[in-house]
Image (cartoon, helix red, strand yellow):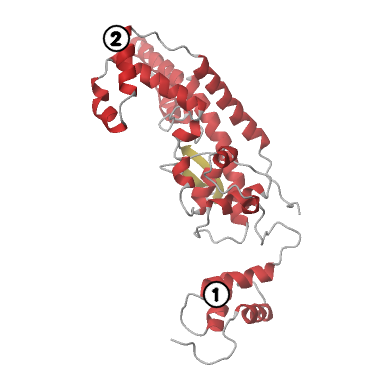
Amino acid sequence: MAPRRQFKLDADLAALRKLAEDERRRVELSPLPVLSPEHQLQLEKFQALSIEAAQASVHELPLEVSLQLSLLGTKAAAENPYSYSDLPRWLGFETWLPRDALLLLAGVSPTAALVDWTYQNLMGAEIDKPTIRTASDLNGIYDRYSVPSPSDWAEDIEEIKIQLKEEANQEKRKKLEQELRSYEASRDEPSTVRRAIELRHRSNILGALSDQWFSGDHDPEKRYSPEHFISWALARGYQPEWYEWARSNRLLDDHEAVYRAPYFDPDSEDYPELLHIALRAWEETRAGGEGTPKQRIERFLKQRYPSLRPTTRELIAQIANWQRTGGRPKV
């Protein structure tokens, strides 16, 4: 059954895809410098070394050979960027936390990502709108983690403009004008502008995924398998950019059943809400706690679902209670 809610992220994904294709094309078409026979031999010998031996001797290479190795690495990353990211490591984990999962689904690595999940508006209210300040893209050819945002120069530029209005000395004005042009050139540098565009699109994707995930009846700190989060996104019409690559490289279970919508899908028309709540109550309380199972279940329902009517809580407690004989629980 088709879900009622679908992500509308085609424009952001198309823009990111074009940026990535343009970058990959530039790298693929860029020629490699021609090495001298001596340097070419050094390069081939180095490439034949083991990883440990190469790491120990890389500092001894001539500059020309080191540069060639760097360019070759860039071309290799352009052909298969996900292999050079930490996506394979994350896909090797048994479970993900929700916020890490949302970042991965949005196409960036959670490792050292700086994200403002909320911001304060002019009235001081907290607004849930994630903004990615810096992160490593999973499909990035170059690591743009440290590329600043154009807004990073805003304060300095504004300060210089204020000084120019107040400064009468022509010599000092010339220096200020030169400094202003330098800051504005850095702000408008193509790689900086490109990075800002990329992060804006990825923030849009992250925001849409986050809004939908946290609107559901999910424990915000509960860990789930990568397949669980992927199936949740696929059921809503969103396919991560790296999904086909991960499946073709056997980093995900390629059995079709794994990627079907979760059995209890809050967006489906036949969603059994009370049955789902009963299952959650059973899962949360069967590990133990104070009181009988029914008491633990009732306590969980009051804390987690305070809006339920008492008669509904009683019904759910009866369904989820596995100890029907009465008496104190066995120790």
- Residue 127: give x, y in percent of width and height: 56, 49
Compared with 182, 146 (above or below) is below
Q: Quadrant of residue 143?
A: top left
Asked whether residue 188 appears in the rendered view, the answer is no
| Placement of 329 over or under 28, stated as above or below | below
Taking depth in this image into account, of 287 and 4 the one nearest to the observer is 287
> For the residue carrying disc 2, how many other residues have a C-alpha within 10 Å: few (<14), some (14-19), or many (20+)?
few
The numbered mark at residue 196 is none
Give the residue at x 68% y 45%: 237
Residue tagged 1: 300
Q: Nearer the viewer, residue 14 or 46?
A: 46
* Residue 275 lies in quadrant: bottom right
**71 on left or right of 253:** left
Mark 2 = which residue?
A: 38
Instruction: Return the residue found at the far bottom.
Output: 327
Q: Quadrant of the C terminus?
A: bottom left
Disc nearest the viewer among 1 and 2: 2
Q: Is residue 319 above or below residue 113?
A: below
Q: Is residue 152 left or right of residue 50?
A: right
Report the front residue among 120 and 198.
198
Dot 2 falls on a residue whose secondary structure is: helix
Q: Is residue 257 visible?
A: yes
The structure residue drawn at horizontal position 25% and vertical position 23%, both measured from the top left corner, is 59
- Secondary structure beneath dot 1 equals helix
**Residue 203 position in % (x across, y down):** 55, 39
Image x and y of residue 31, in percent: 46, 11
Residue drawn at x 65%, y 57% as measured from the top left: 262
Q: Quadrant of the N terminus?
A: bottom right
User: Between disc 1 and disc 2, whose residue precedes?
Assistant: 2
What is the three-letter code of the residue carrying label 1? Phe
Residue type beneath disc 2: Glu
Q: How far across and down, in percent of the image, does residue 28 sit?
A: 51, 18
